[in-house]
Amino acid sequence: MDVFALAQNNLLSPMVLFFALGLAAALGRSDLTIPEAIAKTLALYLMMSIGFKGGAEVAKTGFTVAMAEVMLAGIALSFLIPVIGFFTLRTVSKLSAVDAAAVAAHYGSISIVTFVAATEVVSIAGFPAEGFMVAVAAIMETPAILSALLLARRAGAGSTAPGEGEKLGTLLREVGLNGSVVMLVGSFLIGWATGPKGLQMIAPFIVDPFRGILCLFLLDMGLVAGRGMREAGKHLSPPVLIFGLVMPLVSAGLAALAIWPLGLSAGGAALFITLAASASYIAVPAAMRLALPEAKPAIYLTLSLGVTFPFNLSLGIPLYLLLGQRVAG
Amino acid sequence: MVQTYPKKRIEIILEAPALHRLTARLDEAGVKGYTIIPALAGHGQDGNWSREGLPGDAGRMVMVISVVDPSLADAVLEGVYKVLARQIGIVTITDVQVIRPDHF
């Protein structure tokens, strides 16, 4: 399948069309909203479903060398991408060191919603992925924060004002134990422990309604991204805006190179590339408010939510699937 | 006429990610009680803000209200300042009257 056919299939899928509906509603200033508690429940459901299915898949194979290798590659990329992002931003934009470090942290970490959407796209396209990619997603969440903090400190940014100094251990624990990661990893472990039999028991709840619930969730994410887009012009200079579109492609290229020798399936490689190309907008922004409070949330949240997330969901994922097919073992 | 007693009401509006740090400081200072209220929207130095459409805690604000004995106020404010110094937020202190002084 060529890139245009993949993009067309993706853009015309109900998931992306519901996302587009949310986006259009927000840009048109409609009063359409999903209540906060329901949006949170939908997110938890998706984490539970994707985690459990991944765990049940891993139960068939057990812990493998390939799993360890891909996890290590994920950790290395999560450390490396913020370094590239930081120096790129410092070169092409006028962002301060602390703002550049905070933005870079988002790009080294991952967006679990983008991952969930990509899982569905690769599945619909007929490329089954390794179940352990869920664990890879969880493990890629935090190293970027560490990397960005080191960059900020090296540049002499942050922590000069009086006040509560960031306690790194506490911070990493808070990020590592944020609700979505606990749900994802917990469900993965339960899925692993109970295997295909466990999956069969709760399939009517976590498998059958998955796509419909993903549509509703992406409608909400479209609303969120649309509101972010409305703010983009106010807070983002053109070089930063371009960074939000180009950095995912750079990260995707690096991920493709990293995964090439590891012999992943096309679906697994596409998911790994998607993880590297995605930018966090839940766990890392909250961590940055504590670790680098001088960084402006309007910049990193708007860039991640209003620029990179819609790009990845519409055009990025089909590209990553194509790239995944090229580097698959 | 019901007898009233003077106390200090401390009101803190703070960004949500730092809430646990703040409540830990209040607990350390020996505050007997506080109430946390989610803030819907507002306007500050950086313009308008709203909790609508935010997928996580970053960008959300909360209000913490505590009524303390005047003898405790300085220690509480010292702890609050340690958290608030680098975060987005404001703190105000007002004189209030209560009818059950042992609660504070």
Image (spheres, coloured by chain):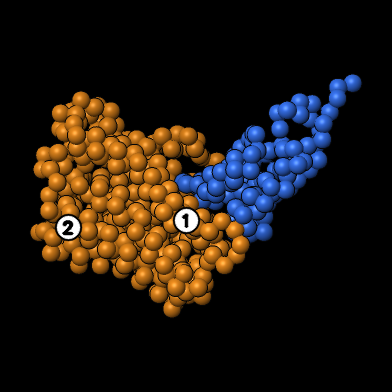
Q: Tell me the kind of residue under disc 2.
A: Glu
Q: In the depicted view, which residue is nearer to us: A285 or A317? A: A285
**Which mark is drawn over residue A167?**
1
Q: In the depicted view, which residue is nearer to us: B33 or A258? A: B33
**Residue with the most extreme right position:** B1
User: Left of B2 or right of it: where is A125?
Assistant: left
- Residue A198 seen from this side: yes
Asked whether the residues under marks 2 and 1 belong to the same chain, the reply is yes
Q: Quadrant of residue A298?
A: bottom right
Q: Tell me the kind of residue under disc 1.
A: Lys
Pinpoint the chain carrying mark 2. A
Display colour for chain A? orange
Q: CA distance from mark 2 to mark 1?
A: 30 Å
What is the secondary structure assignment of the residue under circle 2? helix
**Chain depicted in blue:** B
**Which mark is drawn over residue A69?**
2
User: Left of A297 or right of it: where is A184?
Assistant: left
Where residue A91 appears, as percent x and y from the top left, is: 43, 78
Within-10-Å neighbours for mark 2: few <14, some 14–19, many 20+: few
Q: Quadrant of residue A210?
A: top left
**Residue with the most extreme top position:** B1
What is the secondary structure assignment of the residue under circle 1? loop
Residue drawn at x 59%, y 58% as measured from the top left: A163
Q: Earlier in the sequence, mark 2 or mark 1?
A: 2
